[in-house]
Amino acid sequence: MGQIYAIAKNTFREAIRDRVLYGFLFFAVCLILFSLVLGQLSFNQEIRAVIDIGMAGVSFFGVLMAIFLSITLLHKEIEKRTLYTVLSKPISRPVYLIGKFFGLVATLLVQLLLMTGVWLIVLRIQGGTPSSGIFIALLLIFFEVVLVISMALFFTSFSRPYLSGLFCLGLFAAGRNADLIGQLAERKSMAWMAPLLDGITAVLPNFYLFYPSGKLVESSWASVHGQFVTSGYTFSAVGYGALYSAVFLALAIALLGRRDFI
């Protein structure tokens, strides 16, 4: 545990100094502030605009930060050969990767808190009050980001940064539309592809679960502005995210263990 903590701490320090990270944060804050302007252009929907745009901005930029940091940090250590020095010490590769994972999770948690702070300030300026649904949505977004981190580490463990980024974005986009793929498999005209589509939806990480606002959930429309998801749904989504993250991390450890660094 001491080694994992030391690697996580070092990863956090390295990631938090990355200037590109603050570029993402700057654009996220600009989008959240821009919701004030869009709110004024809407017809008596100022608070709704701030909530919707703010939540979308936190989720979108959180995912982009997770992909960028997870891919570049490990690749930099391989290119600069600092990974060789670390692994030459009595530190196993699973410990190293788990430490990296927790360091990245801590970094993204700080970034999410900063974006959320700006979002809540803007919401307060507009005269709104954060509801319990907003905080549930933020919890789901956090576990969405955690899953993206583990997924990015998995791809980075065996491919180049450019390909890893494409794989992550593609899998994330497909996972966000997992429900549509499932609906497509139910159509009679697509019956011949139903087994393949069902297999895809069974394997795909279902990112649809982490952004339920405005969608049909548990036979009712979930809205962060009113009736949102139940505690049972929240716990199942969090458990799903934690389980899939563990699977991706285990696969990344297995693949990294087969690479010849020393």
Image (tube, rainbow, N blue to C red):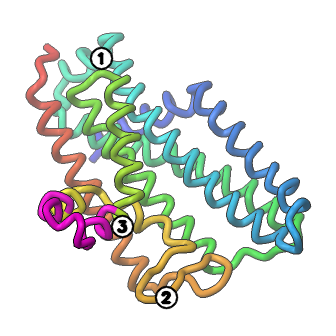
Decide: few, some or many residues near mark 1? Use Cα within 10 Å; few <14, some 14-19, many ≥20: few
In the depicted structure, whether residue 123 falls above or below residue 59 = below
Mark 2 residue type:
Ser
In the depicted structure, whether residue 32 falls above or below residue 212 = above
Verify whether residue 190 appears in magenta: yes
Q: Identify the residue under disc 2.
A: 220
Viewer-closest of 130 and 219 = 219
Asked which quadrant contains residue 72, the reply is: top left
Say which mark, if any, is on residue 179.
Answer: 3
Query: Disc 1 and disc 2: Cα gap in Å?
Result: 49 Å
Viewer-closest of 240 and 40 = 40
Q: Which percent across, then down, holds residue 12?
A: 48, 37
**Magenta span of residues:** 181-197
Query: Disc 3 and disc 2: Cα gap in Å?
Result: 15 Å
| Residue at point 53%, 51% (across, down) | 109
| Residue at point 66%, 39% (across, down) | 25
- Cβ–Cβ under 8 Å for marks 3 and 2: no
Foreground tag (3 vs 1): 3
Q: Identify the residue under disc 1.
A: 78
Q: Is residue 136 among what the camera can see? A: no
Callout 1 secondary element: helix
Q: Which percent across, then down, holds residue 199?
A: 15, 60
Residue 227 in the figure: left or right of residue 83: right
